[in-house]
Amino acid sequence: MLTNNDILKKLRVALQLRDEDIMRILAHAQFKATKPEVNALFRNEDHPNYKPCGDQLLRNFLNGLVVELRGPMPDKEIPKEKGNTHKLPPKELKTSSGKNQADGKSKH
């Protein structure tokens, strides 16, 4: 089974990333990592400086990679409501008492 470290190693090789690139990608996701911390992720498991790659670090790396490759997500504009947004014409709207707003008559 692949570990998070294995996934990160494979992505590093496939995308030809250096330590500085990985640090920059992590920074896109507001995740800071030093060069020794990044190096520790790519060590063999039996090395004394090996550090396992946690789920949060891998998730932040992938989120940062999206920003690196696609660019930052554009700000969404909130649509402004224009007048009456109901599909029924105003004369057909009922109040909570069951009366029509337009004529005040009950349809019961």
Image (spheres, helix red, strand yellow):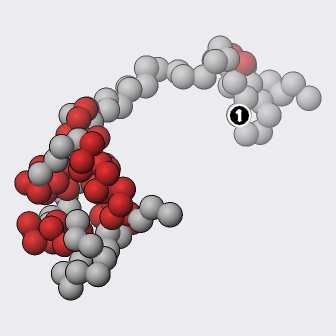
Q: Secondary structure at mark 1?
A: loop
Residue 79's place in the image compared with 43, above or below, is above
Residue occupying the point 23% across, 66% down = 42
Label 1 crowd (10 A; few <14 / some 14-19 / many >=20): few
The reply to whether residue 96 is in sight is yes
Residue 33's place in the image compared with 63, above or below, is below
Residue position marked by numbered label 1 in the rendering: 95
- Residue 80: name its quadrant: top left
The reply to whether residue 59 is in sight is no
Residue occupying the point 60% across, 22% down = 86
Q: Nearer the viewer, residue 73 or 82?
A: 73
Residue 21's place in the image compared with 41, above or below, is above
The image position of residue 47, as x and y in percent, is 23, 81
Compared across the picture, whether 106 is left or right of 42 comes to right
The image position of residue 64, as x and y in percent, is 24, 48
Q: Nearer the viewer, residue 30 or 26?
A: 26
- Residue 104: name its quadrant: top right
The image position of residue 51, as x and y in percent, is 26, 76
Residue occupying the point 91% across, 29% down = 108
Q: Nearer the viewer, residue 50 or 53?
A: 50
User: Which residue is the extreme one toward the right?
Assistant: 108
- Residue 77: name its quadrant: top left
Residue 18's place in the image compared with 68, above or below, is below
The image position of residue 66, as x and y in percent, is 29, 41
Name the amino acid, label 1.
Answer: Thr
